[in-house]
Image (cartoon, coloured by chain):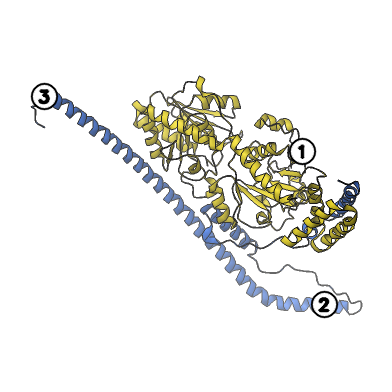
Amino acid sequence: MSIQDNERFLNIIKNLKLSPRNTISEFSEEINNISLEHGIQAAYNYLLRAEVILNIRKPLLAIYDHAFQFIGGAQKYGLTLTSVLQNQFDITIISNKEVSHRDFFSWYNLDLSKCKIKVIKLPYFEERNTPHLDPAFISKEVENPFHLISKESGNYDIFVNNSMNEMVYPLSNISILVCHFPERRPKSYFYADQYTYVVYNSRYTAEWIKKKWKLSPHQHIYPPVDMETDNSKFLKKKNILSVARFEVEGTKRQQEMIEAFLNLNQKYPEIAKGWKFILVGGSNQKNPYLSKLKDTINKNPNKNIELKINIPNKELKSLYQESTLFWHLCGLTHDDPAEIEHFGMTIVEAMQNKMVPIVYDGGGPREIVDNGVNGFRVQSKAELIKCSIRLIRDQKLIQKLSEDAQKKAQTFSRIKFEERVNSFFNKLLKTYNPL
Amino acid sequence: MEETIVKEIQRLKKEMYKRKEEISDIKKLVNKEIDQEFYSNLSELSEKELETYIEECLSSINRNIDPKPEKKSITSHRKILGTPIVLIKRVLLKIIGFYIDLILDKQTQFNQQSVALYQALLLRLRQNKERIKQIEEKVSDCEENLDIIMDKLKDLHLSLEQLKNKIANHNPTVED
């Protein structure tokens, strides 16, 4: 809506409130004019907004993600946002595959029972029996299967697209694209520039939104991280921990970290004595990269390296509580910006549990770890070993850095996330309903 | 809120929703074109994106390697003159087609050789990339080992200094 149209609309609504009988026909005529000039959807949006301004109902919000049926950081972000807003809005969670409130509670400890769930299956992907709905397969030669979601978006006041999927055209009055990282360049069916707001999870993501999409994103909201536990009861062990998915392409660099630990043992046996390296992560059953890691470990059986795959949350929490150092090398030797950590939630989880992080100096981790203050940022395996030795030799340094790490981790807590979400949506509602 | 307003809004909403549901084309819903052309600036692409771009170009070139048009059936809608027209068209096409095929066959040969050349160059590029990657890894390993040696040298130097000081403290008259 243009500024003049918006002012005219608000005047009609004001008059409708003051003298309804005299203005109602003017209102109906305005709706018909809008539908002729700007299309049916514009007229429908007009009516939706009128309902909210006239306090006939709560604002309707829909949140969509084409991967809600999987456990993931991006999905946790979207659903935590949903839980923050579920009292203020009438929310519908839109999924392409079957998913339930019980799933959300068991995966993320989120009670979203106040929200409706609407499953919209996409025939294009159903016919191909694909569990993953990958927009990368859709080209101009094929009709856009995500337009079913585009159409659905027009039934709400606010539509939030939480997917890494720019192929949904937003039809709602207010639309929000939550960008976790701009993976694809603008090609066929690219509509990121049609959203009212683009929300981003890190400054690194914002930088690449500008470079790849030539857009300036609007609102920065760090992901919520809530892995805090009561550390006072636990004695820290000589554990180095890594928590990252075992991606088939090896993008999380577990092989390089294992090599660094083996080097540490070989070149500094007296320093590395008694230290254990534990790698935790999720993986599918058939994973050649994971097999490669297991081979490397089996060739060095006395070197105190352990793999823990698909472990329950309780066990992961214990490992965070007991471990001292946290290694994270995702991004090492990568030149593709999509393969560098966009944020680094597990780094924050480790810092919340008083671990000292040693992370790759690139991407999102730069916003989490301040070099030498609450951890270290490194650019090679050699630097990783150097920083680890420095820490292992100096208990006081570990103490100091871990305390500062825990303090810094508060910036990314669930409470801070709720504050930022509420602030953003309150401002948004004020512009939607200024009367 | 007065009931007449609520009822009127509900009525209009129902009407608009029904009309909306009858339209599947997003462009018609919003009364404007929603798709646009985007062109990649090759210099901005990462290594991985360039690789994908090269693959897509090669696939597209492969699909269009043969410039000859598909053969269509010759027909005529005329009732009486139709048969002689079709016959003349067939004869003409056969004669002209012979000369066009001579040119297009050469073009097809050229296209095939060009694609083969692109693929060979691409293969060589990938092999060189792999060699560079191996060299980079070796250099990185050497740098790592150098770092470790420097560290150990520092430690040794420190130990030596400590030893010297110890000796000096015990026997202050002993010269260095």
Give the residue pinned by disc 1.
A117
Residue A74 versus residue A335 in the image, above or below = above
Given contact means CB atoms under 8 Å apart, are the residues at marks 3 and 2 in contact?
no
Q: Relative to residue B97, is residue A241 drawn left or right?
A: left
Look at the image and tell me whether residue A73 can be seen: no
Colour chain A appears in: yellow
Q: Tag 1, which chain?
A: A
The colour chain B appears in is blue
Is label 1 in a helix, a strand or a loop? strand
Q: Which residue is mark 3?
A: B171
Residue A151 percent coordinates (x, y): 78, 51
**How far across and down, in percent of the image, does residue B109 sit?**
59, 68
Residue A381 lies in what quarter of the image? Answer: top left
Question: Where is residue B102 drawn, in percent x and y?
Answer: 64, 74
Nearest-to-viewer mark from 3 and 2:
3
Residue under pointer 2:
B87
Chain under disc 2: B
Residue at 50 percent across and 43 percent down: it is A367
Name the secondary structure under disc 3. loop
Mark 2 secondary-structure assignment:
helix
Task: Indicate the amino acid at tag 3.
Answer: Asn
Residue A231 shows in the view: yes
Is residue B2 toward the left or the right of residue B154 in the image? Answer: right
